[in-house]
Amino acid sequence: MTFLFNGNTYETNYAKPKILNNYFQSQTILQVPDHANLSFSPALEQTIHDFDISFEDVVDSIKMLKTGKATGPDSINSYVL
């Protein structure tokens, strides 16, 4: 699976999650006007233009899940997937 982000192509298993993590982190900016009030506002400087995920990519990722681990925020056990 490859994808294009800001004119660059990312193909390696190291670069893809790193650039995705950076992208999603950039989508919110933590503002602390006073210590009692936390708010998030979107940062709209970056967008992902092309992102292709094949059926085989999804199946391969699901096969790599560890069945003995706790569920995530969706409460779906990896064994069910």
Image: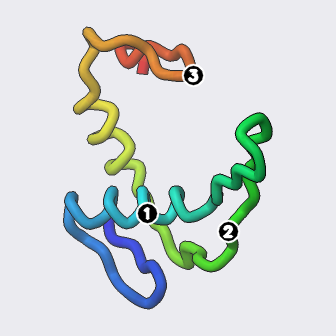
**Label 1 environment density (alpha carbons within 10 Å; few <14, some 14–19, many ≥20):** few
Pointers 1 and 2 in contact (CB under 8 A)? no
Q: Quadrant of residue 10?
A: bottom left
Residue 27, percent from left and from top: 62, 61
Mark 2 lies on a secondary structure that is loop
Q: Where 39 sits versus 17, above or below?
A: above
Q: Foreground: 69 or 50?
A: 69
**Label 3 environment density (alpha carbons within 10 Å; few <14, some 14–19, many ≥20):** few
Q: CA distance from mark 1 to mark 2?
A: 12 Å
Q: CA distance from mark 2 to mark 3?
A: 26 Å
Q: Earlier along the polypeptide chain: callout 3 or callout 1?
A: 1
List the residue tagged with mark 1.
Answer: 22
Quadrant of image for the N terminus: bottom left
Q: Where 49 sits versus 56, above or below?
A: below
Quadrant of image for the C terminus: top left
Pointers 2 and 3 in contact (CB under 8 A)? no
Residue 44, percent from left and from top: 69, 73
Is 37 on the left-hand or right-hand side of 11? right
Is 75 on the left-hand or right-hand side of 37? left
List the residue tagged with mark 2.
Answer: 43
Mark 3 lies on a secondary structure that is loop
Q: Earlier along the polypeptide chain: callout 1 or callout 2?
A: 1
Q: Foreground: 17 or 66?
A: 17
Identify the residue at image location x=55%, y=73%.
48
Identify the residue at image location x=42%, y=79%.
4
Is 73 on the left-hand or right-hand side of 70? right
Q: Earlier along the polypeptide chain: callout 2 or callout 3?
A: 2
Please name the amino acid that badge 1 sits on: Asn
Badge nearest the viewer, 2 or 3? 2
**Label 2 environment density (alpha carbons within 10 Å; few <14, some 14–19, many ≥20):** few
List the residue tagged with mark 3.
Answer: 74
Q: Where 58 sits versus 26, above or below?
A: above
